[in-house]
Amino acid sequence: MTSTSSTPHAVSSPASASAASAEPRWLTPVEQHLWRTFLRMRQQLDAQLARQIQAESDISIADFSVLVVLTDVPDGRVRVLELARNLQWEKSRLSHHLARMVKRGLIDRAECTEDGRGSFVVITDAGRRAIEAAAPRHVELVRTLFFDPLSEEQVTQLTHISERILGAMEGCPEALPES
Amino acid sequence: MTSTSSTPHAVSSPASASAASAEPRWLTPVEQHLWRTFLRMRQQLDAQLARQIQAESDISIADFSVLVVLTDVPDGRVRVLELARNLQWEKSRLSHHLARMVKRGLIDRAECTEDGRGSFVVITDAGRRAIEAAAPRHVELVRTLFFDPLSEEQVTQLTHISERILGAMEGCPEALPES
DNA sequence: CCGACCTGGATGACATGTCAACCAAAGAGG
DNA sequence: CCTCTTTGGTTGACATGTCATCCAGGTCGG
C-alpha cells in the first residue's frame, strides 16, 4: 500500500533488452504524477482515519467496519461468510479478527442450526455502545478530509471513476480473495 | 482501510440526543454510496497489486516502494529520514522494515559522517535485480487495473481530486507521522 | 565548557494480516 | 448407504505494523 509508482530509474530506460515479454508500457510523466499522488492520498486518508478512531474510541477501524455490517442488519446477526463477502476480507483474517472481538466483548458467536458448519456473529450491547460512540467523530472526519474539499461535480466524477476501476477488477485473473 | 461508511443503522436516526457535540453531519445516500465504493475500490486495488507482486517476484510491495526511492537517486543511497519522509512511513515501521530488508540482502547500511546519529541506506545488486525483475509486471497491472479503465479526462479529474483531498490533510490536527 | 532540550534512529512488546494446512459438516454419484 | 469432493470455518507459524520507550549525537543559552 504505498509508493509503487513505476519507472524506477534503474528500469525506466532499459538499455538491456529485458527477458520479460516485450517492453512493458511504462507510465508517462502525467500518469506517474497521478499514481504517486493517488497513492499518497489514499495512504494519508487511511492513516488519519485509523489513527483518529483508535485514539478517540475503544475500537479500531477494522472493528468499526465489522460493527457497521452488524448494525446494518435487523438482529445484528450475520453469517461469518456473509461478513467475509461484505468486507471482502480473507476468511482467515476475519476469523482471527472475530476471535479478538469476541475476547473484547464486542461480539458473540451463535451457532447456525441450518448449516452445521457455519456460525453466526452477533453484536453485543457493548459493541453497539462502542460503535455509537465512535461513529459521530468518524463521520465528521470523513466529511472534513474527503467530502468537504470536493465539489459536487467531483463527487459525481469520483463515483464514476471508482466504479470503473472496480469494474475492471471483477473477474480479474489475479488473486481474488477466493470469493 | 475498510468499510468505514458512516450512518450505521444504530446511529443513523438517533432517537437519543447523543452526548457528543451537536448532531454530526451524517452522509447522504449519494455520499454513502461513493464512500463505500471508494473504499472497496482502494482495498481491491491494494490487494491485487500486493498479491501479484508477492506471488510473481521475491519482494513485497513494501520492499518495492523502498527500492523505488533508492533507484530514483544517483548512488542508490538515501538517508533514512529522507526515506521516511518520502514514503510517509513512521520511523519505527521503516526501521523494522529496513532491518528485514538488510537481512534479505536487498539493501545495506552505510554510516553517515556528516551527522553521527544518522545513517544511510544503500541498494545492493541483489536489490537492484529484484526490483528490475518485479517492475515490468507491476506496471503492467497498474495500467490494466487503474489507467486502462479511465478516459483521459478522468485521469485529469482524478488528479485534481487527489490533490484536493491531499491538500485538505496537510496541516490537519489529527495525528500526522510526526513529520 | 555545561546542562536542557531536540533529533535521528533502534528496540521490545504487542496488534494485526497472510499463507498453508487442517477439520468437520454438506452434497453429490453410484 | 458409502466414498469423493466441496464448503464454511479455524488454527499455527510467521510477516508486518504500531506504540511507547530508550539512547546517542547535536544544538543552544548562558
Image (cartoon, coloured by chain):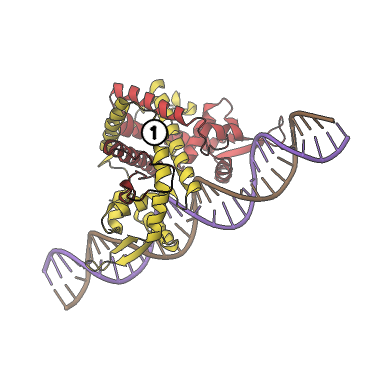
Chain colours: A yellow, B red, C purple, D brown
Q: Residue at x 31, y 43 (%)?
A: A174
B23 and A5: which is toward the camera: B23
Camera sees residue A33 = yes
Q: Is residue A145 above or below residue D16?
A: above
Task: Tell me if A38 is positioned left or right of A113 in this view.
Answer: right
Q: Is residue B136 above or below residue A91?
A: above
Q: Residue at x 31, y 27 (%)?
A: A152
Camera sees residue A28 = no
Q: Position of residue B79 (x, y in %)?
A: 61, 32
Q: Quadrant of residue B51?
A: top left
Mark 1, Cα crowd under 10 Å, few <14 / some 14-19 / many 20+, is many
B15 and A52: which is toward the camera: B15
Q: Quadrant of residue A158?
A: top left
Q: Position of residue A18 (x, y in %)?
A: 41, 30
Q: Which residue is mark 1?
A: A146
Of all chains, the one bearing label 1 is: A
Q: Position of residue A103 (x, y in %)?
A: 44, 63
Figure label count: 1
Task: Tell me if B117 is positioned left or right of B10 in this view.
Answer: right
Quarter of the image for the N terminus of chain A: give it.
top left
Q: Quadrant of residue B41?
A: top left
Judged from the image, the secondary structure of the residue bearing numbered disc 1 is helix
B11 and D12: which is toward the camera: B11
Q: Position of residue A31 (x, y in %)?
A: 38, 24
Amino acid at circle 1: Phe
Q: Residue at x 31, y 30 (%)?
A: A155
